[in-house]
Image (cartoon, rainbow, N blue to C red):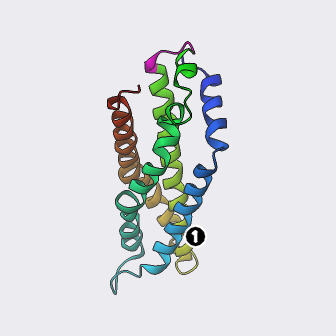
Amino acid sequence: MLGRLHLGNEWRLLARHPLVWLALAGVTGFAGIIASGSPGPEGSDTVERLLRINLFVPSFILPFLAGAIGPIVFLREAEHGMREIVGSYPIIVRDWLAMRLGSGLALLLGACVLAQMAFLIVLAPNHFAELPRLIGYSLVWLLVIHLPSCLIWICLLARLRSTSGNA
């Protein structure tokens, strides 16, 4: 059974990996640059502008982030030559996959939350009166746009891992 100990170990391992922190900082910085450099068409609503910059995340940020995070989440035993040692641990494949899928999905979704916060921080000073409405739309778009795209990317990475013959 997948317990708190397994998930805690997974999070401690990810939190100590420098590429995770670099990727999250890169996503936040890139999202801030996108939000500040995308004025939108004349007369467009702030919500429409936020939607336009939100569509950058699944199309431009998530592919690179998934490529950077994928080896950390799914290939770390193979990269460090410890597949036999980790394979001797008594965990069934379903629990292993659930742990890796869950941690990878949480990492990608956390990056999307950081991107949303960067969008809101850049847009808030000019549109402070609309901030509650922008936060509401951001939460909706996290569920409608970002969660499915994160789920697709992490499942694609898991599928590639399982077909590589090292699962």
- Which residue ends up furthest to the front in the rendered image? 81
Element assignment for label 1? helix
Is residue 90 found inside the magenta-colored segment of the image?
yes
Q: Is residue 161 above or below residue 23?
A: above
Quadrant, the N terminus: top right
**Residue 119 picture location, percent across and down:** 51, 68
Pointer 1 residue:
121
Q: Quadrant of residue 59?
A: bottom left
Question: Left of 151 or right of it: where is 98?
Answer: right
Determine the residue located farthest toward the bottom in the rendered image.
Answer: 42
Apparent side of residue 90 relative to residue 8 in the rendered image (left or right):
left
Quarter of the view holding residue 156: top left
Residues 60 and 54: in front is: 60
Say which residue appears at 58% left-offset and 78% top-offset. 125
Q: For this view, does 11 lie left or right of residue 55?
A: right
Name the amino acid type tagged 1.
Ile
- x, y percent for residue 54: 40, 64
Residue placed at 40% from the left, 52% from the top?
Answer: 146
Residue placed at 32% from the left, 30% from the top?
163
Residue 147: x %, y % from top left: 40, 47
Determine whether 119 is above or below 64 in the image: below
**Which range is magenta?**
89-94
Q: How dense is the environment of label 1, judged by Cα within 10 Å: few (below 14), some, or many (20 and up)?
A: some
Q: Is residue 26 at all visible to an observer of this figure? A: yes
Quarter of the image that includes the C terminus: top left
Q: Is 71 in front, or is 132?
A: 71
Q: Main secondary structure of the magenta part?
A: loop
Count of numbered circles in the view:
1
User: Does residue 141 show up?
Assistant: no
Image spot of residue 136 (x, y percent): 47, 59
Residue ranking furthest to the top: 90
